[in-house]
Amino acid sequence: MRSTLFRQGAKAGMVIGFSTMPFGLLFGAVAVDGGMTPFQATMMSGIIFGGASQLVGVQMFGTHVPAWLIVLSVFAVNFRHILYSAALSPHLRTYSHPARLGALFFLTDPQFAEASKQVDQHGKVEPAWYFGMAFVVYGLWVTSSAIGALFGRMVGNPASLGFDVLLPVYFLGLVLGFRRRPLFSAVVPVSAVASILAMHTVGSPWHVSIGALAGIIAALFLHRPAENARDERSL
């Protein structure tokens, strides 16, 4: 049973992993172009495993920005992972303590999206399935980062080829995957407008966290417990 679940998770991870490989290649190329060695770029992917936050970090390297501001900016981009962990943690209670720590380390955007689908369909996330997907996505991300770092200079400027639009398109696909959730049509526009306004006033990368917080506040105001809804219908 566990081996079957692991293979199912790995299969899901292959789909996600190969779709995110262009981002890994892009990160590796941008990191080396910014002054990092291929080894440093690969280790950054292996240790941080943060995708967008890694791109923010490498773009700030070499710009005479204080180290604490780089760390704070990376945290701002990764703030959404705190929300992911809060939403998924109740479904990880049956995991052992080391397994929970490992699960939270591998909790990226696609991991959260696919794990949420497992909860919707089965009411839980099996550890074998979770780590089957996580190991494949992690391995392909680190591998693609290394390849991008080693051979990225052969491509030249990645932005000139349009690679810089891949990340926004990818995140848009993840968001649309939740389109059938309650309040989607209300919360997402609020979050998007808040993020755009913050981008033009506060600046990047804080617009990511501000947009997320605006969406949370909107969901809190608009959420109606099932019990209250049933009582109102009975009146």
Image (cartoon, helix red, strand yellow):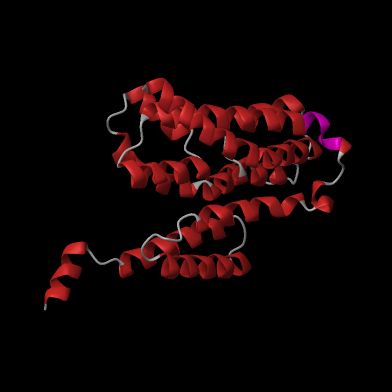
* Horizontal and vertical percent position of residue 158: 80, 46
Q: In the rendered view, would you say 221 is above or below 27?
A: below
Residue 126, image quadrant = top left
Query: Which range is magenta?
Result: 149-153
Quadrant of the drawing holding the N terminus: top left
Q: Main secondary structure of the magenta part?
A: helix
Q: How many marks?
A: 0
Q: Is residue 41 visible?
A: no
- The location of residue 22, given as percent across then percent down, is 70, 41
Say which residue appears at 60% left-offset and 36% top-offset. Answer: 17
Picture layout, residue 230 above or below residue 174: below
Q: Residue 90's x, y, as percent?
A: 29, 40
Residue that appears at 73% across and 37% down:
25
Q: Is residue 78 visible?
A: yes
Q: Is residue 40 rendered to the left or right of residue 184?
A: right
Please give the name of the residue rendered at 75% of the width and 29% of the height, measured from the top-left corner: 147
Image spot of residue 229 (x, y percent): 20, 69
Q: Is residue 235 above or below residue 87?
A: below
